[in-house]
């Protein structure tokens, strides 16, 4: 069966790292069909719409999507694209690799972030000239769904430590509901886990990342804590992510369009290559996913490395080396 992959490079370095990942996926000769879609700032400028309907439909109808980045229009692009694939879980592994100068080389954490609600529900209002409000939405159903996904992910991927991040001592009703949903799932399925206040957790993650495996988070906390963990393992150029729905999924590097280095050919393709490996897992090409991860790990250890990791290799040099290692 041919799998149809929507490829949406977007803005900035998205146009450099996504083609690198497609080259690696093509080299596996799995008969994947790639269909490219347009989205991002440049599309907004050209067509007055950062995410044309045909790109939304392309992602909705594909078997999986590989996305790069969007700049100023990020919210207008990625939020609807996540909706197009029915995504409710954002999975962000933060792992240190041999050969990369990491603050904490013992880090191996996967953030499982609820990504449909919380403070990103998009409900903001100007009440008066002086007062603006934001509504934080937490539902029992979405909380339960992310808890189920997070606990199952931990079990299937061999993580014994599961932590639920929250701030229920202050956001009593909303995070109270989030926490109760996690407690209910854990008690029904007999999962073990710890709870952690998200602010204290930020500090503990820096001091003792080795104590954490899977961290289940509400939306904003997951966004922030996973970027924090990127700092522990060597930078944003390394972190892949998956936006998972019941039948469809979108894969993207955690980093953005990096306008400061766009066009220079020095973007680190690792985050996107590892996102492509997650895409292969999703399509049940587990062996090929492992091959891509092994090849990326070999190149991170032996070089070449891009400037963000202290090397002087280009995106093309790293991609070539990964293709050789495959
Ligand atoms: P955006 O507005 O699209 O979010 P940004 O620059 O604010 O862009 P990121 O794109 O995430 O945010 O980049 C943050 C920093 O990390 C920048 O200095 C960027 O150059 C660096 N960076 C991000 N991704 C990479 C990468 N793949 N390779 C090298 N450096 C990267």
Image (cartoon, rainbow, N blue to C red):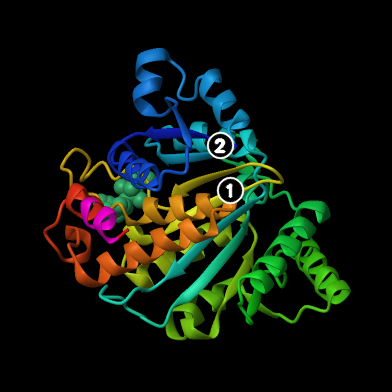
**Residue receiving disc 1:** 283
Give how far across and how far down residue 232 sits, in percent.
37, 73
Residue at 34 percent across and 47 percent down: it is 24
Whether the residues at callouts 2 and 1 have beta carbons within 8 Å, the answer is yes
Q: Quadrant of residue 10?
A: top left
Is 217 situated above or below 140?
A: below
Which badge, 2 or 1, is on the more N-terminal residue?
2
Point out which mark residue 3 bears. Answer: 2
Q: Secondary structure at mark 1?
A: loop
Is 301 situated above or below 319?
A: below
Q: Nearer the viewer, residue 89 or 195?
A: 89
- From the viewer's perspective, is 314 left or right of 192? left
Q: Is mark 2 within 8 Å of ligand 1?
A: no
323 inside magenta stretch:
yes
Give how far across and how far down residue 278 sits, in percent.
51, 55
- From the viewer's perspective, is 129 left or right of 274? right
Residue at 79 percent across and 59 percent down: it is 144
Give how far across and how far down residue 244 sits, in percent.
62, 49
Q: Secondary structure at mark 2?
A: loop
Is 89 situated above or below 249?
A: below
Residue at 22 percent across and 51 percent down: it is 320
């Amino acid at each position: 069966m041919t799998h149809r992959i929507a490829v949406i490079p977007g803005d900035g370095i998205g146009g450099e790292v996504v083609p690198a990942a497609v080259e690696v996926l093509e080299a596996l000769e799995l008969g994947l069909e790639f269909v490219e879609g347009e989205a991002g700032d440049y599309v907004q400028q050209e067509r007055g719409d950062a995410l044309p309907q045909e790109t939304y439909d392309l992602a909705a109808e594909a078997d999986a999507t590989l996305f790069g980045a969007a700049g100023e229009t990020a919210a207008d692009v990625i939020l609807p694209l996540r909706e197009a694939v029915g995504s409710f879980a954002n999975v962000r592994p933060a792992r240190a690799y041999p050969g990369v100068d990491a603050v904490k080389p013992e880090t191996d954490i996967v953030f499982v972030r609820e990504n449909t609600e919380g403070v990103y529900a998009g409900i903001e209002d100007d009440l008066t000239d002086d007062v603006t409000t934001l509504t934080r939405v937490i539902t029992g159903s979405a909380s339960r769904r992310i808890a189920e996904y997070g606990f199952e992910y931990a079990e299937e991927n061999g993580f014994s430590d599961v932590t639920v991040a929250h701030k229920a001592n202050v956001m009593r009703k909303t995070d109270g509901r989030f926490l109760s949903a996690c407690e209910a799932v854990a008690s029904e399925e007999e999962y073990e886990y710890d709870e952690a206040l998200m602010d204290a957790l930020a500090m503990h993650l820096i001091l003792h990342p080795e104590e954490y495996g899977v961290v289940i988070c509400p939306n904003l906390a997951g966004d922030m804590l996973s970027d924090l963990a990127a700092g522990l393992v060597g930078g944003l150029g390394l972190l892949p992510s998956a936006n998972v729905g019941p039948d469809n999924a979108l894969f993207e590097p955690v980093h953005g369009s990096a306008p400061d280095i766009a066009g220079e050919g020095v973007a680190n393709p690792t985050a996107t290559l590892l996102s492509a490996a997650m895409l292969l897992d999703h399509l049940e090409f587990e062996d090929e996913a492992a091959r891509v991860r092994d090849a990326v790990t070999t190149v991170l250890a032996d070089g070449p490395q891009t400037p963000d990791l202290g090397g002087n290799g280009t995106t093309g040099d790293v991609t070539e080396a990964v293709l050789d290692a495959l």
